[in-house]
Amino acid sequence: MPKRLLILGATGSIGRQALDVVERSEGLAVVGLAAERSWAALLELAASFGVSAIALADADAAARAAESWTAGRVHSGAAGLVELIEATEPDLVLNALVGAAGLGPTVATLGESIDLALANKESLVVGGELVGALAEATGARIIPVDSEHSALHQLLAGEAHAGAQSAAPPRAGTVRRLVLTASGGPFRGRLRAQLAEVGVEQALAHPTWSMGGKITVDSATLMNKGLEVIEAHHLFGVPYERIAVLVHPQSIVHALIDLCDGATLAHLGYPDMRVPISYALHYPERGALPVRTLDLVEVGRLDFEAPDEEAFPCLRLAREAALAGGSGPCVLNAANEVAVHAFLEGALGFLAIDAVIAQTLERAGAEPVHSFEDLYAADHRARALAREAVLALA
Ligand SMILES: NC(=O)c1ccc[n+]([C@@H]2O[C@H](COP(=O)([O-])OP(=O)(O)OC[C@H]3O[C@@H](n4cnc5c(N)ncnc54)[C@H](OP(=O)(O)O)[C@@H]3O)[C@@H](O)[C@H]2O)c1
């Protein structure tokens, strides 16, 4: 029986690459698709994959889809995404939404004891502790899609004595350190003063990965790596001081683990998101993909350098928010989403992105978090503060 797969964010960069993986696999059957407002594109995908249940988070888009589609059910609004998870009874949900909007579907999936292929790193940044506790309580697995975390998941499988079936932390203490690589983005090597005039088009010109707009800007500011440090902490249970970031412009080495006996293991491959997506969708099996085998002679050289936190303070801000704990990472994420949105709209300069985040973190502080409601409230408040900062800095 093929695995029943529900894809949230089907019209996006990860969603479409996931559908490419599905087309090449006999082990996967798509049972539902969701997006925010690209209703026409979603209907096309539903027709191609024979799907009879979809959801659109935007109510107007859902209404337009429902008017022109008789082949199935259209669920509407943020609640519609949760309804879709319940109605389609998937074996696996791929959460490829952008931003904190992914938290609700992550919680709904894990709450239903359904395995989660997680691209939406913001779910773990915002609610890592509660999300982790929920997965543990229901027994649902979180299989990372982010290439670095997929690499770590594979590297740690041989070290996690809790079993290769899970992303369980290396409890036996054989792992000294996790290392996440970062391409460095389009502005690697520039001094801070040289970033004052960079525009949207330049920030969106990522040197090695082709991705959605928000994550591409996050890569340019290095916030993406900050979010990934928090994601790795929650996925693998490793303390922050033992998670390092290494800039590697060729994006061939995706992650490394340093072990207690001095051995270091690395995961390598050409940058192609279909590889970690396929890993997450087929796990614990592997699916074949028409991806070139790595030719290191052709690659020629691999370069590494330390991240420049003077020019790109977002990585430092993320670590500080992570260490503050409580609502700190949630505030960081909300402020970043507001600032990146304003930058993409042309309302904020590139260097003001980290300023908005720093100001918001300072004003909001880090409050204790006991429930998802606490997180939603912190997110709401932080967005209001961040919008004020955007207006002041624009
Ligand atoms: N792209 C990559 O290579 C990559 C790599 C690693 C991790 N990730 C992570 O994967 C996630 C998705 O990234 P992406 O690059 O694929 O983004 P993207 O290309 O912008 O696509 C986002 C998808 O999510 C939908 N969406 C956005 N907001 C939504 C909401 N509030 N409710 C329902 N649907 C919503 C969009 O629908 P519409 O089309 O209607 O807007 C679209 O289908 C992010 O968390 C990112 O950090 C991405």
Image: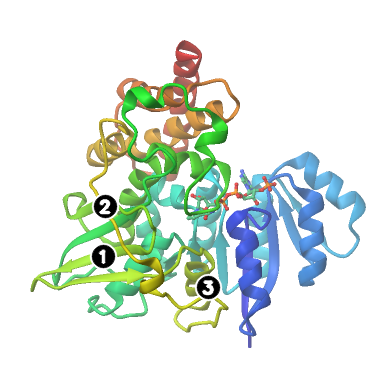
Measured in 3D between alpha carbons, the distance from the residue under mark 3 to the one under mark 2, in whole angstroms, is 25 Å
**How crowded is the residue under tag 2: few (<14 C-alpha within 10 Å), some, or many (20+)?**
some
**Depicted 47 relative to depicted 324: above or below:** below
Q: Residue furthest left?
A: 261
Measured in 3D between alpha carbons, the distance from the residue under mark 3 to the one under mark 1, in whole angstroms, is 20 Å
For the residues bearing labels 1 and 2, Cβ distance under 8 angstroms: yes
Q: Secondary structure at mark 2?
A: strand
**Depicted 98 relative to depicted 19: above or below:** above
Image location (x, y in percent) of residue 353 = 43, 27
Q: Is residue 279 left or right of residue 49?
A: left
Relative depth, front residue between 197 and 355? 197
Relative depth, front residue between 191 and 65? 191
In the rendering, which numbered label is found on residue 278? Answer: 3
In the rendered structure, which amino acid carries the disc numbered 2?
A: Leu
In the rendered structure, which amino acid carries the disc numbered 3?
A: Ser
Instruction: Tell which circle, 3 or 2, labels the residue nearer the N-terminal end.
Output: 2
Measured in 3D between alpha carbons, the distance from the residue under mark 1 to the one under mark 2, in whole angstroms, is 10 Å
